[in-house]
Image (spheres, helix red, strand yellow):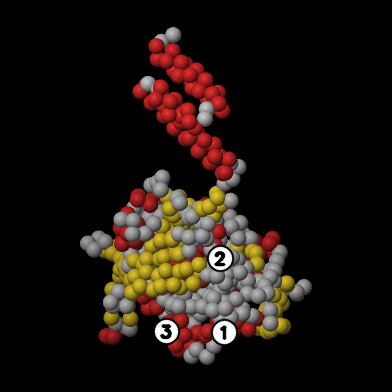
Amino acid sequence: MTDTLRNILEFFKRAWTGIRMIPRVRSRHLPQIFESLTKKDFVSFTAMILLIVISGGFLLRQYVYGGTGTIPDYGGEHIEGLVGQPRFINPILAASSSVDSDLSRLMYAQLIKFDRDLKLTPDLALSLPEISADQKTYTLKLKPNLKWQDEKPITADDVIFTVQTIQNPDFESPLAPNWNRVRVEKIDDLTVKFTLHTQSATFITNFTLGIIPKHFWDGMNPGNFRLSDKNLRPVGSGPYSVREIKKTSDGTIKSLTLKSSDTYYGGKAYITYLTFKFYQDEQNLISAYQSRDVQSIGFIPFDNKVFLQSSDKSNQYQISLPQYQAVFFNLTKSSVITEKAVRQALWLATDRNTVINDVYLGHAKPAFGPILEGNLGYTEAAAKATHTDLTEAGQILDKAGWIMDTQTNTRYKTITTGSGKTKTETRKNLEFSLATNVSPLNVKTAEILEQQWEQIGVTVHLVIVSGSDLQDDYIRPRNFETLLFSENTGADPDPFPFWHSSQSHDPGLNLSGFSNPTVDKLLTEARQTNDTGVRAKDYQQFQDIVTQELPAIFLDSAVYVYTVPRKEQGIDLKTIIHPSERFLDVNHWYIDTKRN
């Protein structure tokens, strides 16, 4: 036995003897006891006392907290960066802007909503709408005792006011096509009846609608509706309300802070503040994230690997979206792209894999038509028929009379007008413009398409503008030849709003101006039946026609990546309908915790 071990055993033997003597010790004996201790014994005695105190502390803590855990507590701040500027924090105007959609989703509850499993569930409604036997009448009842954020009651009058405002063309709501030819009437203070002109199997999804307060907006002139400051300081019904707006000297909104609302029917949100900071473009957003000016960002992956690197300080959610990116050909505008041979050649010259790999770093799927894989009516026929062949593309253009100018590498036709002495010949080049917004995703995709199409003698003039200018100056007036844009098809991918001829003009979403009587019939029939077999058959035939007519070239379907600090808990995201739906259960997110 070593001397060290012998000393340890001797120490504990003497300590045990001392402990056994404690009951016999009187306070008057303590001075004599301490005087009799050697220096070595005193150090050992002190160490033992400290050991007993520390051990007792651990035992006490275990006794107090043993068997308990942590639960969410109120407090904390979520700081997120967004690209763009808020204009309409208003659910009947917000659809055309991702920033407005995000903020509106936080500040307005919906009549019904999609849950994390993409199933419809009541929100402000007491239950899902009751549907009549002929499926033309929907009766919806609100929960009792609902309140706006100014403490006023939410009633059937607010629902009716919202729908009628959407229906009024003077208010220019992008939701108008969803509510056309729908009669809305009040049954009682909490009940509203909606009567459709024709049966619609997909109409129920329109109730995923945030409603606006009648008392707050009533009397507003339609011409002032979009200009009103009420769009930035709204009275909502959701889990958050506007607390503070910070602007630069020129009026640009720098940041907007929301505060958890006490009136939200679902209970006060755990995270007290949500602060959003706004940036001109993705590159500035990236810099802000890298410098920790913002802690959270949502994006579709593009050519910047910072977003694809995992971190021990953040959680990253990759979420599927029912959304495709496509090049839309404006068939109503006089241009070379109205010639089907040109569209066929462009289709054959388009390599989707290059776009997916170079722009989205592989985090996307190819899209081959208006019905995405996994959705009702999807068929593999379009995917199997899709291929890239520059030789075949060139042959189609040759046959259509487009001659290759080897010096300029641009194809052209000679157009002859008149006859005899009035006969004139003009050269018509195979060229057109491609409009898109300043998003790096779209800019890089447009540049790749320009290079691919150049190989078959096509000259493309890129038009890169801001998101708002693209909407106001190009999409709404249909003032483009070709357009690179994304469309979200929703949970029930009803193609009617995107491809029926009645939707060719703003605020309709038929961007190509595509018109086909058979397609109109198929899309109308499909939305008037609940027979999924019939709907699937109609959608398959619709997709075949679109594949043949080529009103658009479908490129890809991307994922949405949402990055938040690891300290933020309670987030449960799988598949969402729209990026703004990442906030569907934001009132359950939390940063702070406490013992239960």
Q: Position of residue 306 (x, y in %)?
A: 35, 50
3D distance between C-alphas at marks 1 and 3 = 18 Å
Residue drawn at x 63%, y 60% as measured from the top left: 119
Alpha-carbon neighbours of circle 3 within 10 Å: few (<14), some, or many (≥20)? few
Q: Position of residue 133 (x, y in %)?
A: 77, 73
Residue drawn at x 45%, y 59% as measured from the top left: 76
Helix, strand or loop at disc 3?
loop
Where does the N terminus fall, quadrant-wise?
top left
Mark nearest the camera among 1 and 2 is 2
Is 173 situated left or right of 180 in this image? left
Above or below residue 323? Residue 135 is below
Quadrant of residue 453 within the rendered picture? bottom left
Above or below residue 161? Residue 149 is above
Mark nearest the camera among 2 and 3 is 2
Is 42 situated left or right of 510 in this image? left
Dot label at residue 214: 1
Dot label at residue 268: 2
Dot label at residue 227: 3
Q: How many marks?
A: 3
Helix, strand or loop at disc 1?
helix
3D distance between C-alphas at marks 1 and 2 = 24 Å
Dot label at residue 306: none
Is 241 situated left or right of 82 in this image? right
Q: Residue furthest left?
A: 407
Mark nearest the camera among 1 and 3 is 1
Quadrant of residue 481 within the rendered picture? bottom left
Q: Amino acid at mark 2?
A: Lys
Nearest the camera: 499 or 574? Answer: 574
Nearest the camera: 46 or 430? Answer: 46
